[in-house]
Image (spheres, rainbow, N blue to C red):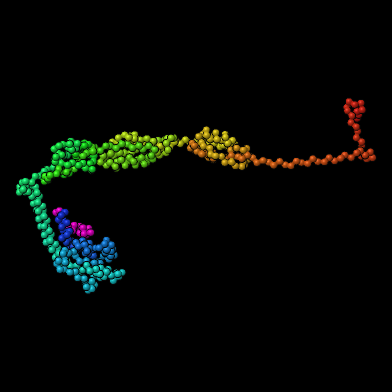
Amino acid sequence: MYEMLTSHLPFVGDSAVSVAIQHISSIPLLPRDINPEIPAGLEDITMHAMEPKLNARYATADELLRDLEDFRKNPAIVFHYAPPSVNTAEQGVTRPIPSATELAKVQPPKDSSRSVIARRTESPRRVEPTRTAHRENRKLSAKTTVLIAIAGTLAIALGAVLFMWNYILKDMFDPDIEYFETQDFVGQVYREVRTNTEYLLNYEFRVSENSTYNEIFEEGIIYDQEPKAHHREERGDNRIPVTVFVSLGKRPMPKMPDLTNQDYRAAQNAVNAINSDNPELNLNLKVVPQGRVSDSVTKDLVIDTIPKAGETLTPNMTISIIYSEGPEIVMVEVPDLYGLTLSAARLELESRNLTPDEPEYVDPSHDEPQDTVVFNTQKNEMVPEHTLIKLQVSNGPKETPTPPPTPTPTETPTDPYNPYDPWESPAEPTYPVDSPNAATPNP
């Protein structure tokens, strides 16, 4: 916040240590001393957040957010936080609470919905800021910085003296002390080191569990040690413990995994995982999926890979994942099967590589014989091979009921010849044609 308002860092030093010391002992310039156009309320918020003492700062982020929100609503607001001070308790400085008269000078406008100033002055740590007090504190903090710098210089000097005593002066005053420098084992074969009689008299070797692959040293070669080479120690009665890091050799290149019968998208992810799991190898493997028509492998499953499973992968290799696109789609025309028997309709569909469904028996509409196809789906349409075709088959015509037999009519009896009936002549006897009694036709 300070740097955004002023375009300057609050603390500047030649090193991180000097900046850290200023955080403890120095007080930065007030933002309005650098840029008078900065609102006083925003300066109050910034300096209050930068208080060196923990109990003098905002207790929570919510408190800071609340003040920022109040400033957003009323840019003319003043919070009356005391400027940062150092060791105010030791100076006997107190922070008087501003009087009502002083507060009245900075009251918000009449139309303000509430008195922000009154709320701000409830806390005992908020006082009327004075720039004179702030500048006096800056002078005091400068003196404190000098004292801390002197103390730091003395500490560095003491460390140098101790170093010289341990490594140079101590030998001069006590020449009976025997010192020993750790030998450099890096680059040696560990098997030879651990069997070297001279080494075993002076050192106790242990192989680190953190030994890893190494691109420089071959397998079995020591690539690091603790303590480091030429480390100087007092020679005691015991052997010096040395931890060695033994190379596992160059990291082996990964093998191509078996990805057959996996979904080709999952297979792509598996190859990409090889890249991410071995960043030090810089494999940069590329994956190229290739679809292929297959009647035997389910669609989207991997048929084969190039390279094959088990082959060694190399950097910048392109891996081809060949997956099934399913069987080739052949379009055929569905015939109109009306009038065919069920068996003939099935043979016709199968000859076109279409699949007949179980027939649905229905009552015929035109007295079709039983087991005759009366309807099939998708007739005269082009469909893919092996499409299921539904059939409707006749149950056969309904039987016509037999009518009851017609009774035989009774014959009317013929009256005998009545000779007295003038209108009725007796029936002439019939004779054979060749009979002598046959009547001669009347010309």
Tell me residue 208's x, y (percent).
Answer: 21, 42
Q: Which residue lies furthest to the left in this view?
A: 173
In the image, taking residue 254 as reference, residue 18 lies left or right, namely left
- At a point 55% along the width and 33% down the height, the residue shown is 347
Q: Which residue lies furthest to the front in this view?
A: 237
In the picture, the quarter occupied by the C terminus is top right
Q: Which of 39 and 241 is in front in this view?
A: 241
Tell me if residue 80 is in the magenta stretch. no
**Nearest the eye: 180 or 202:** 202
Nearest the eye: 5 or 314? 314
Q: Which residue is drawn at 16% across and 54% down?
A: 16
Q: Quadrant of residue 216?
A: top left
Q: In which quarter of the image is the N terminus?
A: bottom left
> Splitting the image into 4 quarters, where does residue 364 fall?
top right
Residue bounds of the magenta highlight: 1-15
Above or below, comparing residue 26 to residue 291 in the picture = below
Q: Which of 322 and 72 is in front in this view?
A: 322
Prevailing SS of the magenta stretch: loop
Q: Which residue is drawn at 16% across and 68% down?
A: 93
On the question of residue 72 being in view, the answer is no
Q: Position of residue 409 (x, y in %)?
A: 81, 41
What residue occupies the far bottom of the structure in this picture?
101
Res 156 seen here: yes
- From the top left corner, tell me how far across and down residue 222 is, in percent: 19, 39
Q: Which image quadrant for residue 53?
A: bottom left
Give the x, y percent position of residue 413.
Answer: 86, 40
**Whether residue 353 is situated above or below residue 17 in the rendered picture:** above
Residue sitting farthest toward the right: 420
Q: Number of labelled discs?
A: 0
